Amino acid sequence: MRFLTASESHGPQLTAIIEGLPAGLTLTADRINEELRRRQGGYGRGRRMKIETDQVQLLNGVRHGKTTGAPVTLVIENKDWKNWTDIMGAEPVEDPSQIKKQVTRPRPGHADLNGAIKYGHRDMRNVLERSSARETALRVAIGAIAKQILEEVGMEVAGRVVNIGGVWDTSERPDDLALIREKTEDSEVRCLDKQAEEKMKQAIDVAKENGDSVGGIVEVIVSGAPIGLGSHVHYDRKLDANIARAVMSINAFKGVEFGEGFDMANRPGSQIHDEITWSKEEGFSRKTNRLGGFEGGMTNGMPIIVRGVMKPIPTLYKPLQSVDIDSKEVFSASIERTDNCAVPAASVVCESVVAWEIANELLTTFGGDRMEEFVQRVNERRKWAREF
């Protein structure tokens, strides 16, 4: 499968085209809209979320609730577009210097200056509109479809926040992913522990009062993956590497780890590698899951556990120093409407990109033009692996 997105933060709409979905997948707007709702929530979100109530339109490739095998087009309207028509319109203007809200002061931590130099833009709005995290609404919509593919073959996805602003949720992660989803949906910061939730909210409040922002760490768990997704034979076929790339492609993400991750540097191999077991009922398994479900770039049948680090949002209401690209004078960086913490929302986005990579690998490995054919092949592999 593959997809393309086209969007600007204040353009008329967000558009995605997905190619390669099998025919016969049940697909409705309601399921996607529920995931979009989850992305828009979370403590620390800004005013933009009060303007937009994201709803998807399925324009192509779906008929009477089922995919046809043709490309699927998704569209999400930007309700704020009516306030930006003159600024962001596609039609030519006689005097470009009269366009309102031009951006000549790059914001530290954003794509503004690098993108302007790369593409030769004197108005950096051309950069910030596309580099905006608004595009992640499409990632979540696409991920909602990927999650449905995973569900068809008995796989589950859950996500949670484990750190915001240095406050950790140290509670034990349940094996039951449905319980994780239930608890995180009941939390404004998508963590499991209520005491940690209150401390995280306090950290967000303090940052907001200071005109500052906070980042954090999110975790995604995927259960039910068949053994052998991905491959050891070439670098671009390693599934953990592809997942890491996808997580790093989320706005403001700066680090990825699987299982025990970076803590492995502090411990000997005897405390890291997962011992192998076998039973007639389950086949091969592991006593522990410190490697997060991967060995040699391939799934080993254990739950996939991946974490991503999100830096603090770089747009600050107490702006950092910058330099105007026209006058070269020192200024405080310009302010675009923003959140001061988007870690809970990023947890939902992270779920979506991980689900997409796994669904894509499933279809690459097992093929199938029809969902019925695809599901049958996955189940046959599971049976074969148990009897190996």
Image: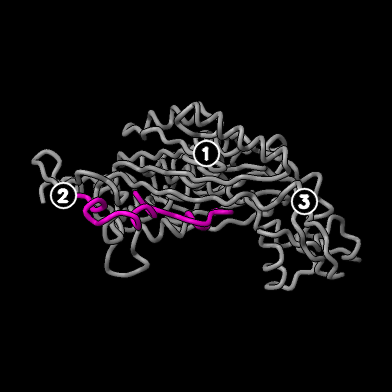
Q: Using the image as rendered, state which of residue 43 and residue 65 is in the foreground.
A: 43
Image quadrant of residue 180? Answer: top left
Q: Secondary structure at mark 1?
A: strand
| Image quadrant containing the N terminus | bottom left
Contact? badges 2 and 3 (CB < 8 Å) = no
Which numbered mark, 1 or 3, is in the foreground of this view?
1
Amino acid under label 2? Answer: Ile
- Residue 166, percent across and down? 53, 43
Q: Position of residue 86 (x, y in %)?
A: 84, 53
Q: Position of residue 225 (x, y in %)?
A: 29, 46
Could you tell which of marks 2 and 3 lies nearer the N-terminus? 2
Q: Are marks 1 and 3 in contact (CB under 8 Å)?
A: no
Residue at the spot x=60%, y=43% of the render? 342
Q: Which mark is residue 335?
A: 3
User: In the displayed structure, does residue 26 sit left or right of residue 344?
Assistant: left
Residue at mark 1: 167
* Residue in front for this viewpoint, 238 or 193: 193
Q: What amino acid is labelled 1 in the image?
A: Val
Q: Amino acid at mark 3?
A: Ile
* Disc on the earlier residue, 1 or 3: 1
Mark 1, residues whose alpha carbon is within 10 Å: few (<14), some, or many (≥20)? some
Alpha carbon separation for disc pair 2 and 3? 54 Å
| Residue position marked by numbered label 2 in the rendering | 276
| Position of residue 304 in the picture relative to residue 288 (left or right) | right
The image shows a total of numbered marks equal to: 3
Q: Is residue 272 magenta?
A: yes
Asked if the magenta segment contains residue 187, the reply would be no
Query: Residue at point 64% right, 49% down?
Result: 313
Magenta span covers which residues?
247-275
